Image: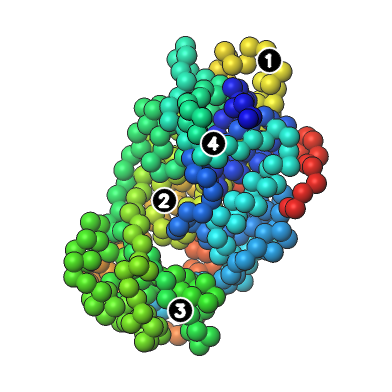
Amino acid sequence: MTRPPTSTTCAIAGGGPAGIMLGLLLARAGVDVTVLEKHGDFLRDFRGDTVHPSTLTLLDELGLLDTFDDLPHRDVEQLSLEVSGQQVVGVRLADIPGPHKRIALAPQWDFLTLLSERAARYPTFRLLMNSPAYDLIGEDGAVRGVRYRDADGEHELRAVLTVAADGRRSTLREAAGLVPVQLGAPMDVLWLRLPRVESDPQGLAGRIGRTGMAVGIDRGDYWQIGYLVRKGGHEELRRRGLGPLRDDLAELLPFLGDRIAELDWDRVAFLEVGLDRLPRWSVPGLLCIGDAAHTMSPIGGVGINLALQDAVAAANQLADPLYRAQADPDRFARTLNPALLDRVRRRRELPTRGTQLFQRTVQRQLVERALNGEVALPPAVSRLLSDGAWSRVAGRVVGASLGRMLMYGLRPEHVRTPERAPARAGRS
């Protein structure tokens, strides 16, 4: 039996996109890193899987894009939003400046497997599955590592730096006494699947009508549909039965036709929507990134991509100090300069706040109105949209600007960490 590790330079709680990406980048830079994942595999339902151009750029910089493209995925090249049958926003990704003109819809378990397999080719990377982190090791006013459980019991893992990448209900964030500011969301989402046929529209389409709002995501052979319900309204909807839900979908997404009759509750999953962020992302010895630092709403499908950007920013800032710390025999009794950790927050503050401001604006101006049955566009907007020439020009400009912000982010990150040791040969 392999003895569990007792120390590492960087302990990362959470084997999601942020945790695995950070582990890969640090190991690539020669840092000893251990990732603790509470589950035994990556097969979680309804994890974010909209891989934006910002993430495709990172994969390209790591030499992983060709391997990623070999995974099962669906490329999307256009986005649209319709209100009462009138297109308000249309985004052609071909119009967006940048090297990548598509969104790739890939199962997150495949994406995480790709990253973890590449990370495993570096000798300083360790991934422990079925190993939930449940508490912090604290000494002299600083975090010195993490406590976790596995099949053999409870263990302590001492670390120079501990990273909480354990999601929107982060256990380590709570243990550190860090409390997020709740920004509020008026809705929750029902996710469901229905078959797709070749005559259907393509891409990602949001529809607002008198019965509410739905988003259809083209998965190739099926539609993944997000149907918005008022916050706390899920149980009431289930009590009303499938009939009203089918009727609403028939009005919002009429191209589905008779396929709506196939819908049953076994095809419907509930997602509780949240929107929050931490005022500070760190305490001495601990850094929060991804959903542990800021929960995003599903608007724009940006969550996974912002989490990955956090990981890259953290690696760029911390890889060299952590690599140097490994040579210090007293490293587990010393505290990494807290100012270094706060630089990660300062670097990521603008894109976090800016993206959440956009999401809150959409919630107020579109989602709340749709949930209230208010679907009429303001008269000035309707007049402008009725001017075909203006609509085509302005729509392209607005769509390209909005698309650039959502697809690449307000402050795109790039891989700056060195590859200090060549990776062992492997599949990826």
Left or right, 109 with reference to 325: left
Q: Earlier in the sequence, mark 2 or mark 1?
A: 2
The image quarter containing residue 177 is top left
* Quadrant including the N terminus: top right
- Residue at the spot x=44%, y=58% of the render? 46
Label 1 crowding class (10 Å Cα cut-off): few <14, some 14-19, many 20+?
Answer: few
Check disc 2 and report the residue beneath it. Answer: 296
Q: Earlier in the sequence, mark 1 or mark 4?
A: 4
Q: Amino acid at mark 3?
A: Pro
Check disc 1 and report the residue beneath it. Answer: 328
Question: Which one is in front, 267 or 174?
Answer: 267
Left or right, 13 with reference to 423: left
Q: Amino acid at mark 1?
A: Asp
Left or right, 93 with reference to 118: left
Asked which secondary structure carries label 1, the reply is: loop
Check disc 3 and report the residue beneath it. Answer: 195
Check disc 4 and report the residue beneath it. Answer: 36
Q: CA distance from mark 4 to mark 2?
A: 23 Å
